[in-house]
Image: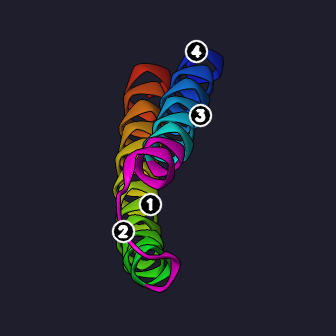
């Protein structure tokens, strides 16, 4: 079960990162702005995405740790 959970987390993380890359590429290709403006917006977008990735990773880690702890407590209660 834990292996499936880890696989799901990896799949979601890869999909998220892939979406970020595709969105950034589309933004660059479709932006009718000067290079300086585009670079400024790209930097702001990268900072925003970076913060969001950290937030998602922290929430995912906390959820995974809670699930592991619950599993441990269930195993301990079954063993007792």
Q: CA distance from mark 3 to mark 2?
A: 30 Å
Residue drawn at x 56%, y 45% as measured from the top left = 21
Check if residue 76 falls in the magenta segment: no
Q: Quadrant of the C terminus?
A: top left
**Going from the N terminus, do you reach mark 2 or mark 1 first?**
2
**Going from the N terminus, do you reach mark 1 or mark 3 first?**
3
Q: Which numbered circle lies on residue 4?
A: 4
Mark 2 is surrounded, within 10 Å at the Cα level, by few (under 14), some (14 to 19) or many (20 or more) other residues, namely: few
The relative height of residue 12 versus residue 7 in the rendered view (above or below) is below
Q: CA distance from mark 4 to mark 1?
A: 21 Å
| Residue nearest the viewer, comparing 5 with 41 | 41
Q: Which numbered circle lies on residue 15?
A: none
Q: Which numbered circle lies on residue 14?
A: 3
Which coloring applies here? Answer: rainbow
The residue mark sitting in front, 4 or 3, is 3
| Residue nearest the viewer, comparing 48 with 1 | 48
Q: Which numbered circle lies on residue 53?
A: 1
Q: Position of residue 31 (x, y in %)?
A: 37, 55
Q: CA distance from mark 4 to mark 2?
A: 44 Å
Mark 4 is surrounded, within 10 Å at the Cα level, by few (under 14), some (14 to 19) or many (20 or more) other residues, namely: few
Circle 4: element type? helix
| Residue nearest the viewer, comparing 70 with 42 | 42
Q: CA distance from mark 4 to mark 3?
A: 15 Å
Q: Position of residue 22 (x, y in %)?
A: 51, 37
| Residue nearest the viewer, comparing 8 with 1 | 8
Mark 3 is surrounded, within 10 Å at the Cα level, by few (under 14), some (14 to 19) or many (20 or more) other residues, namely: few
Q: Position of residue 38 (x, y in %)?
A: 43, 73
Q: CA distance from mark 2 to mark 1?
A: 27 Å
Magenta stretch in the rendered image: 24-36
- Please give left or right for residue 4 compared with residue 51 in the image: right
């Amino acid at each position: 079960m834990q292996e499936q959970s880890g696989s799901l987390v990896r799949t979601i993380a890869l999909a998220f990162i892939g979406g970020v890359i595709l969105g950034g590429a589309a933004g660059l290709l479709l932006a009718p702005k000067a290079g300086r403006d585009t670079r400024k917006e790209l930097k702001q977008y990268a900072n925003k995405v970076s913060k969001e990735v950290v937030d998602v990773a922290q929430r995912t880690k906390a959820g995974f740790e809670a699930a592991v702890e619950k599993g441990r407590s269930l195993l301990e209660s079954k063993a007792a």
